[in-house]
Image: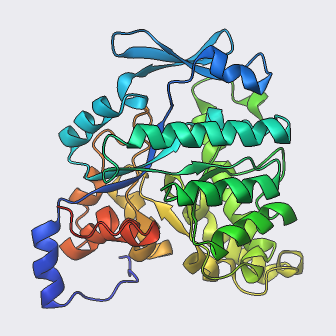
Amino acid sequence: MFVLRNRPPSAGEVTEAVTVRARRIDVHSHFFPALSKEDAAILCSPDAPWLRDNGDGTGFMMSGDHEYRPVEAPLWDPAARLAEMDRTGTTIQVISATPILFSYACAPSIGERWAAKINDMASEMCEIDPVRLRPLSHAPLQDIDAACREVSRAKDNGHVGVHIGNHIDGRNLDDLELVRFLHHCATEDIAVFVHPWNTMAPDRMTKYMLKWLVGMPAETHLAILSLILSGAFERLPRSLKICFAHGGGNFAAQIARVDNAWRRRDIIRTDCPNPPSSYTDRFCVDSAVFDEPALAHLAAVMGTERIMMGSDYPFPLGEEDPGAVIDRAAFLDEPTRDALRFTNADAFFSLNAGGLQ
């Protein structure tokens, strides 16, 4: 039996939750703007990403001249996306660029121009319904000064946070410059959503989508532990709002192992003064874990106040019916379901959307 970290609801909270239980904010949904091959040429790379729109509601994300992934119109067409949101009962999507667009390896001056272009296109995409579509910004993390400038500019233009990769050019999130960027986000009240990309050992994961099934959960676990074990969370302001995709990857399943290692090996305690599990109040995760036992374990580790509904829409490894696992979870009461589906994300991203049904 799992003991969850949320207090019992009051009668007033129960009444309110029943009224608004269908509200949904999806914090993990991707878009790919209608970038042409000419747009992508600024990256000066033969593998630059762009969108091929077939004109019939289908298309391809392209990597140079190569077809990277078949996609459908909701990925780039906001009207089609809103129709899908209506179908699935999603109130708000917090949208982030597909990770292939990160482009951290290009020159800093190019990276800043590219980030600004992606961010401006995200703003244009959300103009159709700026209440229901809320963009996360892109940051040129190969140049931290430029990244700080751009995410602050994007915030002023309506972006509700920033979407970053879990590592940048082989540097984990405890890199001093990346910690400086996170400090800027904390100071400026810019929420951070971390997504895995460019997974480790790709030559050993060439088949069966192993890069997604093994590599991505491992990368996210590595990102979280890099902040905990390095002592970065000790140095960062508690005001930092940071969320990790895919339920935090392998973190919840392995935290007991990490705590055991911390107790028994001084090398792990070198920069981490407290048990690793004690830092779960410093970050959030999305709910994209796909079944009730996994969600219950995640809630036992993280506390329900630190889980936000995320579907990985519109990709095929995402949750087909956003929020369905939360809806069916017998261990949750109705006010807590509403928190996971809506109010946790509303507060985390400062959406002020509480009046929406």
Residue at 62% in and 69% down: 255
The reply to whether residue 248 is in sight is no
Question: In this rendering, is residue 209 above or below 330?
Answer: above
**Picture layout, residue 44 above or below residue 183:** above
Q: Nearer the viewer, residue 114 or 207?
A: 114
Q: Position of residue 336 (x, y in %)?
A: 27, 74
Q: Is residue 97 above or below residue 251?
A: above
Image quarter in which the N terminus is found: bottom left
Q: Is residue 259 above or below residue 329?
A: below
Residue in the image at 73% along x and 35% along y = 103
Q: Position of residue 282 (x, y in %)?
A: 60, 77
User: Where is residue 125, by image quadrant?
Assistant: top left
Q: Nearer the viewer, residue 239 or 202?
A: 239
Quadrant the C terminus occupies: bottom left
Rendering coords of residue 11 (x, y %)? 12, 89
**How is the protein colored in the picture?**
rainbow
Give the x, y percent position of residue 217.
60, 49
